Image (cartoon, grey):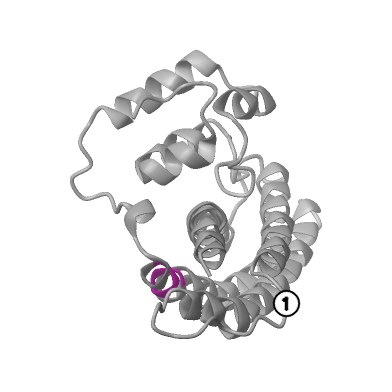
Amino acid sequence: MTATLDRTIREIVATDFRTAAVFQRHGIDFCCNGNRTVEHGCRQAGALPGEVLRELDGVLAVPAAEAPSFASWDAPQLVRHIIDTHHAFVREAMPVLLRHTRKVADVHGERHPELVHIARLFERIAAEMSEHMAKEEQVLFPYILALATPDEEAPFAPFGSVQHPIRMMEAEHRFVGDAMGEIRQLTGGYTLPHDACATYRVCFQELEAFEADLFTHVHLENNVLFPKAAALEGTL
């Protein structure tokens, strides 16, 4: 595959997930807005298209020995991976981050008032993600797994079509992605001030790791799993 300006970001990352690091490095959203072309993504992020294409081609030119080919996975594999890897990470990370963002806001909020806003933002993120993952695991994912079982009758869809809960999940992804983007902006890209204590430093590292996992998590759902689910339903 060759990266071109008219290809969608979704298509490139789904083909070779290693390219996600290039988009992330240039501040180009490859998950919630992966349906944009590379040219559009570069323009919105203020990135140099030629430089982005050179980096993408450099990645694509090297054989992917161990990089997982998520696009080739079937829906049940993707569902299991998302739950076992990304949902598990979120559930483990959220309580710790809630404690740390509150503590850092309490201790340093007077000198750095943005920390108070960050703590409140992350409370909203945690509440949204908790409900979001429950809806996926209890409603959407079981329906997708039933679609992927050819020996069974077409499952009853209380929501009419899989496209309806998918659109809801994508809207919730955008909310969380925008909130994490606001946190990145408020922190200057997780840049630490000179008076940062140990908890402050750890908190920023945890926030950055949470954001990185979220990018992968949302990409796998929006750009890989959800299109497969729609295609499966279309064959019924």
120 to the left or right of 95: right
Q: Would you place residue 223 above or below residue 50 in this image?
A: below
Residue at (56, 75) in percent of width and height: 96
Q: Name the residue under label 1.
A: 159
Residue 206 lies within the magenta run: no
Q: Which residue lies furthest to the top in this view?
A: 50
Res 107 visible: no
Q: Nearer the viewer, residue 106 or 83?
A: 83
Q: Which of 58 and 96 is in front in this view?
A: 58
Residue at (47, 71) in percent of width and height: 89
> Which contiguous range is marked in magenta?
78-82
| x and y, in percent, of residue 177 in the image | 66, 53
Q: In which quarter of the image is residue 97?
A: bottom right
Q: Nearer the viewer, residue 56 or 73?
A: 73
- Which element is circle 1 on? loop
Residue at (41, 79) in percent of width and height: 149
| x and y, in percent, of residue 198 in the image | 52, 60
Q: In which quarter of the image is residue 134?
A: bottom right
Name the kind of residue labelled 1 in the image: Phe
121 to the left or right of 201: right
Res 136 visible: yes
